[in-house]
Image (tube, rainbow, N blue to C red):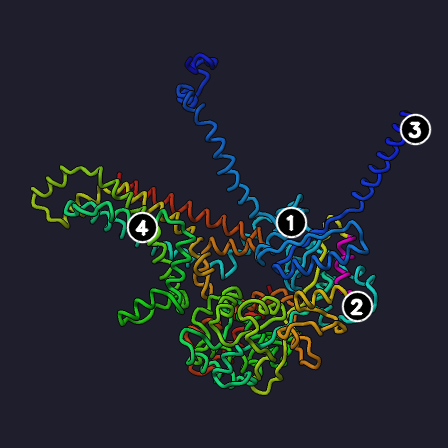
């Protein structure tokens, strides 16, 4: 029995254009409705609740009679030098990580898609993708040990090669580099896989035509392949932006925001404020972060799509 | 007996039984206590509860230990949502932070007055000052947390050295330890956050040398450039830089990481608290350490340090507030204090039997030891935590890029910190 038979028909004149379209595909909307409801309950409601807490006095936020304080928590947070410093550090870490991850993933995908790699392709793919599916906390603890100044494998290896030791997480620069390296190891496999998938869809005839017209490899890469990879570049860049702006676990496990608050990125800072009972301020920080992530992701997506068009 | 009589008698017995059970259920109360003191704390509270139950039939106690950060966030959330436990047991400064966040801890002044004078007589001004916040007695103080300095006994013997009495001794012994064993460090410190580096580092050394304050004085004035404090601070920082007696990882380490170094046998000298001894009597360093007052720096007076006072607080929304207050006041009785001494090392009374204490614990209760009480700057000044965070940044920067002239750095840093304090006081 079709749904058209079960639902009463309304006159076409009574329905606006959008309503008409929805009515025409009502079966589809009916099937989607439960999932939309679940998304609203478990996706949008917590976000809304988090934003609401940002407007509450911390000591009453969890009680029966919460006191609204307007934008006071936002004013406190934005006038906090530690928050401003944390925001800038988060942005720096994000830009460096996005650039490195997307570039390296593209290079790896180009190498893995090269027809000359006729043996071991699967093994290389597996080796690059494996860190992505490795449980992050466990692997970050191992990385922390590897960079340890007292017994870490990294400095033992550097010493054996006659190279100067790497400071690991004992200096601000070292801690930044450590997190960039660990996050690169953890994420680059996924971005590489997305590029590889896009490679499968490339129009080979364009490359062959360019080759016949005398274009060298570099020109074919820049003028023929890269423009066709824009969908993957867009997806990877936007996804990486979202991922790195929200960086938390690696900081929680490896540096705890140190040394000297140098890796106290926004998510971790909000978490630590939350842990001390400053719910309003922590939620205000999370709301600012949400706005930054949303704004940057939409802007990046829009800019790339516009360029592609 | 006729069947009717039998039925009537059975009914009466059943009614009496139900009434008795109902009365007992009405008396039965279970106090829930949240703390972060691990198995030692659980064992101590259980013994105290058994004792308390003799005079309070039907009252049982269940104590739950959790990691400190979890204890803090759970306590704040529970007090704010009227799901509070009956009692919070922790260090005074943490209970003050709970009060700052919730304003839901009871004033225990009246409950303390009900305790016998003989029990309260042992509390000194320092204990009551740590227990009082904004005119309210927030906790019944019953444990003084005392910290001493310790050195590995077998390592000292191997190095042909005695317990380090002065800072020069400490530097010499520390270097010998590092030369004797590859991969070990002379000294254990923690520097991963402001309270680790300042409270458990510089301030501990300052108090351990008889100073009353380490960062600000009783009026809230910055005093880090006073000669005695400046010397302690510079000597502490040199452990990281020129002396290289601490692990480079120290700048990221909190007490958990530091304990891993101590218990893993990778440091020769470390701070020892009376709360550590219970565990360290049984497992590594398993008695292989000798303790004493902090090494003398300059003209300081080597001392043991009363780092904090622990006590029990009762939330205003405790389900059994009256009994909870009685249990908290019970902590001051001689019997409860004896249990506290034997299981956790910390007490406020001085009339207890110390004959059965382990060798590790005896020095903490030895008569005549010089005790220096830490100040309560964190509780006295609402801006103190932010000031410490600012100071911490300056200290870490100095460790990363050691100045060529430490005295000039100290003067400059004091100026900056005074400006920061002025700003914080204004805001």
Segment colored magenta: B322-334
Picture layout, residue B29 above or below residue B343: above
Crowd rating for badge 1 (residues with CA inside 10 Å; few <14, some 14–19, many 20+): some
Label 2 resides on the chain identified as B
The local secondary structure at tag 3 comes to loop
Q: Residue at x 45, y 65 (%)?
A: A259
Cα–Cα span, label 3 and label 1:
59 Å
Pinpoint residue A145: horizontal percent, then vertical percent: 40, 62
Picture layout, residue B153 above or below residue A84: below
Label 4 resides on the chain identified as A
Pinpoint residue B232: horizontal percent, then vertical percent: 54, 80
Question: Residue B384, labelled with which disc?
Answer: none
Q: Which residue is mark 4?
A: A188
Write down the quadrant of residue B296 in the picture.
Answer: bottom right
The local secondary structure at tag 2 comes to helix
Q: Which residue is mark 2?
A: B120
Residue contact between numbered discs 2 and 4, judged by CB atoms under 8 Å: no
Q: Which residue is mark 1?
A: B78
Whether residue A85 can be seen here: no
Label 3 resides on the chain identified as B
Of tags 3 and 2, which is closer to the observer?
Answer: 3
Q: Residue at x 56, y 54 (%)?
A: A275
Q: Residue at x 92, y 26 (%)?
A: B2
Cα–Cα span, label 3 and label 2:
62 Å
Q: Which residue is mark 3?
A: B1
**Magenta stretch prevailing secondary structure:** helix
Crowd rating for badge 2 (residues with CA inside 10 Å; few <14, some 14–19, many 20+): many
Write down the quadrant of residue A118 in the picture.
Answer: top left
Pinpoint residue B40: horizontal percent, then vertical percent: 63, 61
Crowd rating for badge 3 (residues with CA inside 10 Å; few <14, some 14–19, many 20+): few
Cα–Cα span, label 1 and label 4:
42 Å
Q: Nearer the viewer, residue A287 or B167?
A: B167
């Amino acid at each position: 029995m079709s749904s058209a038979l079960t639902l009463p028909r309304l006159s076409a004149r009574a329905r606006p254009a959008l309503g008409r379209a929805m009515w025409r595909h009502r079966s589809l909307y009916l099937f989607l409705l439960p999932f939309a409801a679940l998304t609203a309950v478990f996706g949008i409601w917590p976000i809304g609740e988090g934003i609401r807490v940002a407007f509450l006095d911390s000591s009453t936020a969890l009680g029966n009679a919460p006191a609204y304080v307007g934008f006071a928590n936002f004013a406190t947070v934005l006038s906090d030098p530690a928050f401003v410093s944390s925001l800038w550090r988060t942005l720096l870490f994000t830009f460096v990580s996005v650039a490195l991850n997307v570039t390296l993933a593209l290079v790896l995908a180009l190498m893995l898609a090269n027809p000359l790699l006729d043996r071991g392709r699967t093994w290389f793919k597996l080796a690059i993708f494996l860190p992505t599916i490795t449980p992050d906390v466990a692997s970050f603890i191992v990385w922390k040990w590897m960079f340890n100044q007292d017994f870490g494998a990294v400095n033992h290896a550097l010493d054996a090669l006659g190279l100067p030791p790497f400071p690991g997480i004992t200096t601000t620069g070292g801690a930044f580099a450590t997190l960039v390296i660990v996050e690169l190891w953890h994420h680059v496999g996924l971005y590489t896989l997305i590029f590889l998938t896009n490679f499968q869809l490339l129009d080979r005839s364009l490359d062959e035509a360019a080759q016949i017209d005398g274009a060298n490899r570099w020109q074919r890469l820049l003028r023929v392949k890269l423009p066709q990879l824009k969908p993957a570049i867009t997806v990877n860049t936007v996804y990486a932006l979202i991922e790195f702006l929200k960086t938390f676990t690696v900081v929680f496990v490896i540096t705890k925001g140190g040394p000297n608050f140098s890796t106290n990125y926004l998510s971790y800072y909000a978490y630590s404020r939350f842990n001390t009972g400053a719910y309003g301020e922590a939620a205000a920080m999370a709301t600012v972060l949400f706005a930054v992530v949303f704004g940057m992701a939409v802007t990046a997506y829009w800019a790339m799509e516009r360029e592609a068009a | 007996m006729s069947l009717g009589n039998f039925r009537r008698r059975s009914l009466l017995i059943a009614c009496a039984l139900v009434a008795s059970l109902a009365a007992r259920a009405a008396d039965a109360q279970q106090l829930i206590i949240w703390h972060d003191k691990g198995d030692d704390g659980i064992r101590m509270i259980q013994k105290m509860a058994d004792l308390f139950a003799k005079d309070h039939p039907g009252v049982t106690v269940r104590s739950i230990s959790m990691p400190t950060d979890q204890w803090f966030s759970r306590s704040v959330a529970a007090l704010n949502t009227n799901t509070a436990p009956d009692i919070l047991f922790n260090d005074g400064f943490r209970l003050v932070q709970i009060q700052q966040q919730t304003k839901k801890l009871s004033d225990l002044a009246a409950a303390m007055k009900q305790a016998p004078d003989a029990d309260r007589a042992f509390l000194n001004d320092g204990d009551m000052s740590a227990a009082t916040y904004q005119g309210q007695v927030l906790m019944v103080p019953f444990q003084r947390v005392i910290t001493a300095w310790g050195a590995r006994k077998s390592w000292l013997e191997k190095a042909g050295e005695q317990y380090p009495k002065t800072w020069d001794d400490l530097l010499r012994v520390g270097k010998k330890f590092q030369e004797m064993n590859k991969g070990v460090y002379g000294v254990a410190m923690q520097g991963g956050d402001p309270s680790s580096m300042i409270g458990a580092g510089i301030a501990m050394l300052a108090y351990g040398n008889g100073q009353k304050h380490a960062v600000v004085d009783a009026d809230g004035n910055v005093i880090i450039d006073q000669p005695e404090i400046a010397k302690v601070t510079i000597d502490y920082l040199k452990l990281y830089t020129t002396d290289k007696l601490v692990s480079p990882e120290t700048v990221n380490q909190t007490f958990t990481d530091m304990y891993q170094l101590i218990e893993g046998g990778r440091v020769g000298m470390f701070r020892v608290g009376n709360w550590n001894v219970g565990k360290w009597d049984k497992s590594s360093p398993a008695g292989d350490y000798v303790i004493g007052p902090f090494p003398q720096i300059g003209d300081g007076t080597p001392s043991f340090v009363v780092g904090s006072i622990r006590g029990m607080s009762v939330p205003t929304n405790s389900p059994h507030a009256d009994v909870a207050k009685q249990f908290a006041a019970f902590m001051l009785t001689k019997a409860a204090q004896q249990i506290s001494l034997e299981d956790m090392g910390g007490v406020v009374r001085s009339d207890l039997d110390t004959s059965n204490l382990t060798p590790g614990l005896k020095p903490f209760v030895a008569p005549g030891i010089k005790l220096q009480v830490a100040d309560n700057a964190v509780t006295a000044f609402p801006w103190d935590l932010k000031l410490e965070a600012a100071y911490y940044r300056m200290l870490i920067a100095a460790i990363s890029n050691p100045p060529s002239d430490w005295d000039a750095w100290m003067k400059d840093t004091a100026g900056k910190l005074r400006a920061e304090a002025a700003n914080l006081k204004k805001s």
